[in-house]
Amino acid sequence: MPILKETIKVDLGPRSYPIYIGKDFMEDADLLRPHIKGRQVVVVADENVAKLYLDSFCSNFRSEFELLEIILPAGEINKNLESFSLIIDNALGAGLNRNATFIALGGGIVGDVTGFAAACYQRGVRFLQVPTTLLAQVDSSVGGKTGINHALGKNMIGAFYQPEAVLADVATLDTLSKREFVAGLAEVIKYGLIIDRRFYQWLLDNIELLLARDFSALTWAIRRSCELKAQVVSQDEREIGLRAILNLGHTFGHAIENSFGYGYFLHGEAVAIGLVMSSALSSKRGWIEESQVEILCDLLDKIGLPSKLPEGVSPEDFMRVIALDKKSTDDGLRFILLRDIGEAVVASDVTPEEVLGLF
C-alpha cells in the first residue's frame, strides 16, 4: 500500500497546485489522474530513469490514455535545444493536441526540459512533475522554472510555467548514487541558510540520518524545503523581488558549471561551492561571523561536497562568465548574500574587487 505522508500547496490562486510527498506511491495512477485533462499523455524520462521506472510507471496509464513515451539522453550536457526539439518533434509526429498532458519523470534536467516543451507546445499544455532525485524533489520541480542551457550560460532559454502537481516519492532516492544523492543536499542546506535558521540547525544535528537515507529524516527535510520554497514562490512567482533569495550560491555555481563545462560538476556540487563563496563574501562584509563559514565548510566536508574551487581557475575568466549570469540587471549583477544565518538579502552593489578577493 502507498504511504502518503504530506500534501503541500503552492498557493498561486487559480494556478495553485499540490506537492505530494510520500513513499512507494509513484505508480498510484489515482493520485495523478485528476490532474490529467485529456486522453493524450506524454511521459518523458532520460535513459537512466527509463531503465528503472518508465515501464512500471506507464503501465498504469496505457489502458486508459493514448500514451507517448520519450527517452532523452542523460546528463546536464543534454539540457539543450536538441532535447527540447526531440520532445516537440515526437509530440507533433504523434498528433498530440492542446489537451495533452506532459509528465516529467526524472531529475531536474528532465523536469526543466519537459516543462519548457510543455510551455511552448501549441502555446502551452498541462504538465506534471514526478521528480526522482533529491535535488529535483526539494527544488527544481517546484516553482515553475523551466528551460534549457546555452553555450554562453545556464538556463538562458526558458519560461516560468507551473506544473499541475508534483509527486515526490522518497523511495526513488534509494536508487541514487552517493554522488547524486549528496549533491541534492546542497539545495536543502540552502533553504536553512536563506530563510530558516532552526532548519539549518536541524540539518547540522541530523546530517548522519540524512546521509543514511533515513525515511523519516528525508521526508522531513523534503517537506520543509518544499514548504519554504512554496512560501517564497507564492509571494513572488516570477522572481521580481523576494524569490531571488532562492538563488543563494547560484550565481557562483552557474559560473562554475559554465567554466568547467556542463557535467564536470553536478549542479548541487557547484552550488555547494557557491554557498561557501557567498557566505565568505557575506563574512568579509561583516554580516556573518567567519566561524559560520567554517561551520558550513565542515558540514559540506562531512557530506562529501566540495567547498572550494579547484586550483588553477583564472579569476579574470571566472568574472567574465559571471558577467553573463541571467540574474544581472541594468544596475549590474545581483548576488544573494547573508545578513545572518536564516536571513538572505539581495545585494546589487557587489564590486568585481570583492569577488576577486575571494580567490
Image (cartoon, grey):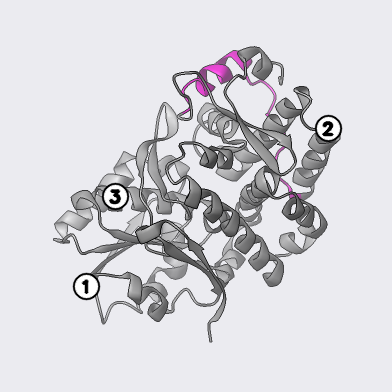
Which residue shows up at 65% across the image and 19% down it?
355
Image mark for residue 289: 2
Q: Decide: marks 3, 2 in contact (CB < 8 A)?
A: no
Q: Which quarter of the picture shows residue 177?
A: bottom right
Work out whether residue 123 can be spotted.
yes
Q: Provide the residue designation for mark 3.
A: 119
Q: Which residues are magenta?
A: 303-325
Q: Provide the residue designation for mark 1.
A: 39
SS type, badge 1:
loop
Left or right: residue 339 versus residue 109 is right
**Amino acid under disc 1:** Arg
Which residue shows up at 47% across the image and 45% down it?
236
- Between 346 and 290, the residue placed more toward the observer is 346
Q: Sort mark 3 into few (<14), some (14-19) or many (20+) by Cα contacts within 10 Å.
A: many
Task: Determine the CA span between mark 3 and mark 2.
Answer: 44 Å
Task: Find out whether residue 309 is within the magenta segment.
Answer: yes
Q: Is residue 152 above or below residue 271?
A: above
Which residue shows up at 46% across the image and 43% down it?
76
Task: Determine the CA span between mark 1 and mark 3.
Answer: 19 Å
Q: Sort mark 1 into few (<14), some (14-19) or many (20+) by Cα contacts within 10 Å.
A: some
**Amino acid under disc 3:** Ala
SS type, badge 3:
helix
The residue mark sitting in front, 2 or 1, is 2
Q: Is residue 319 above or below residue 226?
A: above
Estimate the x, y position of residue 50 in percent, counting from the top left.
Answer: 41, 64
Estimate the x, y position of residue 298 in percent, counting from the top left.
Answer: 81, 42
- Between 65 and 244, the residue placed more toward the observer is 244
